[in-house]
Amino acid sequence: MSQNRMRFAPSPTGFLHVGGLRTALFNYLFAAKSNGKAILRIEDTDQNRKVEGAVENLMESLKWSGFQFDEGANIGGEYGPYVQSQRLPMYQKYANQMVREGKAYFCFCSAEELTKIRENQLAKKLARPYDGRCQHLSQTEIQKRLDDNMPFVIRMKIPQDFEEYHVNDLIRGEVKFKTSQIDDQILIKSDGFPTYHLANVVDDYYMKITHVIRGEEWLPSTPKHIQLYEYLGWPIPQFAHLPLLLNPDKSKLSKRQGDVATEDYRKKGYLPEALINFVALLGWNTQDDQEIFSISELKEKFSLERVGKAGAVFDVNKLKWMNQQYIKEKTAEELYELVQPFLPEYTKKLDQEVLTRILTIIKDSMVLLTDVDQKLDLFCKENPTLSDDALIAISQTEDAQKVYKALLNQLEQTDNLSSENFGSLMKAVQKETGVKGKGLWGSIRVAITLVEHGPDLGAVVDIFGKEKCLKMIKNVIQ
Ligand code: GLU
């Protein structure tokens, strides 16, 4: 049996869409699981959509996500080049061959003519936007127009002598498409560049791709691709079209309702492991509904059989939850490295040891790496104070005020403060005020940590020491 070969074939539009990230991941996992090869191909033949720096950006996002392709752009391999704009003569060759064989034809229709034809077709309730009129031009007429330098495109002929195309899809089973609805697709545009359809098929053949795993939006194009394989006498790869990604309101995932670029998630403080884990579950799951997967576990457990047809909802709250789980698993030392890009300027004076200790304390309450900024306020700001009304109310109760005054008193009589003697001071406060339990600990927690639930009080006290604790208590005494 030949080796499985998969490809991720993004068009460099300026960023790596999270849907693209999922496609890359599923290709990568399928290759890993089946001892196959994952190939990275850049589909950059659309000159109108060219964006400066887009390829670099794409590569950067793929690298951040932790992918390692076996072959491809910037990697190399025996079927290169892996960038379509570097393979133009190849597409031209096959387009010309199909013209010679009567499987494709020159079309000279102008944009205005095409609009008219489309309107006509619509009026006649015909689904094909183009009526195929240039197919019937005589050889002399074609030559004359070519000699006159008339702009042209090359279109493939969709034969109209059978009723349906059948696409066998590994996820959807057999999908049928009416031949009468499939347009004579342009293969070579008037600028001489191939369209996605031709370039994609030629490259998949040349790169010996066995499985085409891509988004559902390409399913309607697949009959055209099948026709091209047949025209060129090439074996047809297996297809798997991944379900659409949806906004929570079930509409197609869009920028308007949230971030769609992988780099946005990186900038917002998500960990690549969490994002990968999250996108793995967009359309795929295990029988037992496990949610947290390391990449090696994904490689082991992934299968196309458990990818569904139904659209997958992109629930950012679930992603946040996952990110939190992954942050919790990091050691403070690992986190120290990870938060570096997100540290505000004023924390730069903290030394590594202190910052690592602080990270140990705040780690469990961090959802995003960017949270570090606000969580460090307590430790780094000169005079952090309560700002939340509900917490201010807690600090103003009679019991709380009694407790603060008693603790102030205790602190003033102590040489230093650490987690070791803090317990006994609190006992003394309890004895003196008669306040205990939540009334006692809750009010002190609010005064010292400025939150109701959060970091370990003893650990915070340890870092603050006597002076800062005194200051914090004075801040809340009325
Ligand atoms: N270049 C296409 C895209 O960016 C790839 C489609 C395919 O995988 O065939 O979505």
Image (cartoon, grey):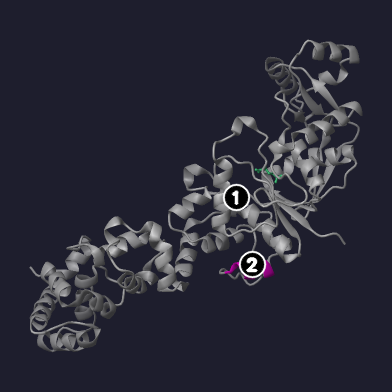
Amino acid type, residue under disc 2 in the picture = Leu
Task: Reply above or below: 111 against 70.
Answer: above
Query: In screen coordinates, is 83 left or right of 264?
Result: right
Separation of residues labelled 1 and 2 (CA atoms): 18 Å
Inspect the magenta stretch and tell me whether residue 138 lies in it.
no
Element carrying mark 2: helix
Query: In screen coordinates, is 313 left or right of 329?
Result: right
Name the one closer to the observer, 124 or 136.
Answer: 136
Q: Compare marks 1 and 2 and give the one earlier in the sequence.
A: 1
* Residue at the image point whose x is 91% and y is 32% from the top: 161
Task: Reply above or below: 16 against 462.
Answer: above
Please state, as top left, top right, bottom left or bottom right, where the C terminus lies in the image: bottom left
Residue 195, quarter of the rendered image = top right
- Extent of the magenta region: 293-300
Report if residue 464 is visible in the image. Answer: yes
**Residue 263 in picture, x, y percent from top left:** 50, 50
* Residue at the image point whose x is 56% and y is 36% from the top: 51
**Residue 153 in picture, x, y percent from top left:** 76, 23
User: Which residue, given by chain and number where applicable, does mark 1 sit on?
Assistant: 19
**Residue 205 in picture, x, y percent from top left:** 82, 45
Give the main secondary structure, helix, strand or loop, of the magenta stretch: helix
* Residue at the image point whose x is 79% and y is 37% from the top: 224
Please state, as top left, top right, bottom left or bottom right, where the N terminus lies in the image: bottom right
User: Which residue, given by chain and number where applicable, does mark 2 sit on?
Assistant: 298
Name the one closer to the observer, 12 or 437.
Answer: 12
Amino acid type, residue under disc 1 in the picture = Gly
* Residue at the image point whose x is 21% and y is 72% from the top: 448
